[in-house]
Amino acid sequence: MNAFEQARFNMVEQQIRPWQVLDPAVLHTLQHIAREIFVPSAYQALAYTDTEIPLGHGQTMVAPRIDARLMHDVALKPSDKVLEIGTGSGYLTALLADRSHHVVSLEINPELHAQAKANLQSAGITNADLRMADGSAGASDAGPFDAIVLGGSVFEVPQTLLDQLKVGGRLIAIVGDEPVMQATLYTRTSASVWDHRVLWDTAAPRLLGFTQPSRFHF
């Protein structure tokens, strides 16, 4: 076992499992997707640490336990078609692709989009369609989707994205404003009804392109 493999094993045992990620199939994915491929070379020593990592362009990778828990809680099936908002480095894309049939992933920044494409190629991921696009609009031409995963936080989930779920489909997002954000799972129960439930408290960097609350200062 090389140093990265040992660090990956330690990440799963010490960071991921204690965060209630216990599905054996999900743990297997986390154990064999090489996160160091998706981390900028200057930060590779931090690939498996419980910390955010700068990607440049004002963007960061969230701590691995956040990606792991999002992927776990959206409960993917091998037949699922998934929409990811915010490709970033492509790490979460790789996790989702490993657990589903196909992923469409949207990234607004052209440099990150190009880098993620190269990263996923290096990791041998072939069932992800990466698009340079504003994620807040989704990808209705490729939908509807069994699952939608937002890789960063938003003040609120736009109806445009909820409309792109199949009936029975799930959307997971980190919703709210600092200091309190909550991972929230939305389920489309019929053509016009969406249920939601709050799963856990956290904080994550903002996704670009989404509406922010207006701020009033008195």
Image (cartoon, grey):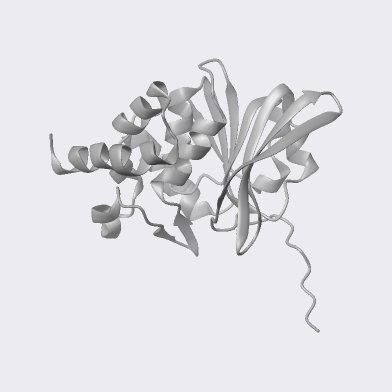
Viewer-proximal residue among 79 and 134: 79
Viewer-proximal residue among 86 and 110: 86
Q: Where is residue 176, by image quadrant?
A: bottom right
Quarter of the picture holding the C terminus = bottom right
Relative horizontal placement of residue 54, taking residue 47 as reference (left or right): right
Task: Determine the residue positioned at 34% across, 50% down.
Answer: 39
Q: How many marks are shown on the rendered structure?
A: 0
Q: Give the x, y percent position of residue 133.
A: 63, 46
Quarter of the picture holding the N terminus = top left
Viewer-proximal residue among 210 and 192: 192
Which residue is the extreme one toward the right? 192
Relative horizontal placement of residue 19, taking residue 161 as reference (left or right): left
Viewer-proximal residue among 189 and 207: 189
Q: Give the x, y percent position of residue 7.
A: 22, 43
Task: Determine the residue positioned at 78% across, 24% down.
Answer: 189
Q: Where is residue 104, by image quadrant?
A: top right
Q: Is residue 126 visible?
A: no
Q: Is residue 52 visible?
A: yes
